[in-house]
Image (tube, rainbow, N blue to C red):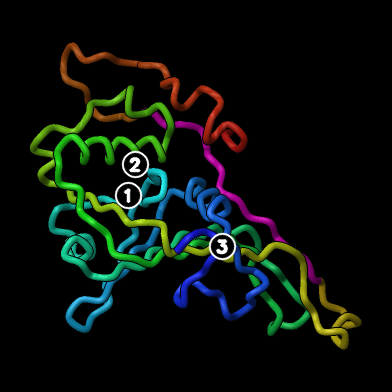
Amino acid sequence: MSAGAPSRRTSVRRHADRAEYDRAKVNSILDEGFICHAACSVDGTVWMIPTAYGRDGDRLLLHGAAGNHVLKAASAGAELTVAVTFLDGLVLARSTFNHSLNYRSVIVFGTASEITDPAEKAAALERIVEHMLPGRSAEARPPTPLELTKTRVIALPLDEASAKVRAGGVGDQPEDLGLPVWAGVLPLHLAAGPVLDDDQIRPEGAPRDLPAPASLTQPGRWSRDSA
């Protein structure tokens, strides 16, 4: 389905006014996230995993151990559902019924394909690392051929995806506005703390006291919220 044309599965029914079908909006939420939840049904059981991901154009890249149940089933043709969610605030109303959350979420449906070519698989894994921290792939060792064989990578098209967003204040009933109860929003956001050097014992002759890499110090993904 093209952007702006929701499918039966991606059409938002409850609070349809919060739906976002624009591909740019979907991509912006996916690009800001770090972890997704992927689920599929196999032999009457629904399986779900949290996993890191990356976006490569119009497809979502997921990876995990070669024997991972969800990724293995998805590679064999099982329908996949993937969710990415941000919690932006607690909405505290005068009544418990009207308490809510401010959030941004994306749901993706579809059939994934496995990436088996070693070069394509390595490029996909690099994309996932770059999604985590831009510039990091150039600073660390790439995967070995053995590590590639131990890893399963799948690509899920973003053809069937939609976003749902709630942003704003309290939605109390008119008759509750006079209650002596505080109401408002507690904003929440993801922020980085100070970096922590790895403290593992290094072998003799290994470099010590290396400075933080450019991927962490240059303006980028964490620059706004870094401590």
Circle 2: element type: helix
Name the spot of residue 68 as percent of width and height, x first: 18, 60
Q: Residue at x 41, y 44 (%)?
A: 57
Q: Residue at x 65, y 64 (%)?
A: 102
Whole-number angstrom distance, CA of label 3 to CA of label 1: 23 Å
Q: Residue at x 38, y 63 (%)?
A: 82
Compared across the picture, whether 22 is left or right of 143 comes to right
Q: Tell me which segment is drawn in magenta.
A: 183-197
Q: Nearer the viewer, residue 158 or 91?
A: 158
Quarter of the image for residue 48 reads bottom left
**Residue type at the position of mark 1:** Leu
Tag nearer the camera, 2 or 3: 3
Q: Which mark is residue 4?
A: 3
Q: Which mark is residue 61?
A: 1
Q: Is residue 193 magenta?
A: yes
Q: Is residue 75 magenta?
A: no
Q: Quadrant of the C terminus?
A: top right
Whole-number angstrom distance, CA of label 1 to CA of label 2: 7 Å
Residue at the spot of label 2: 128
Q: Residue at x 57, y 80 (%)?
A: 13
Name the spot of residue 115 as percent of width and height, x first: 20, 48
Circle 1: element type: strand
**Residue type at the position of mark 2:** Ile
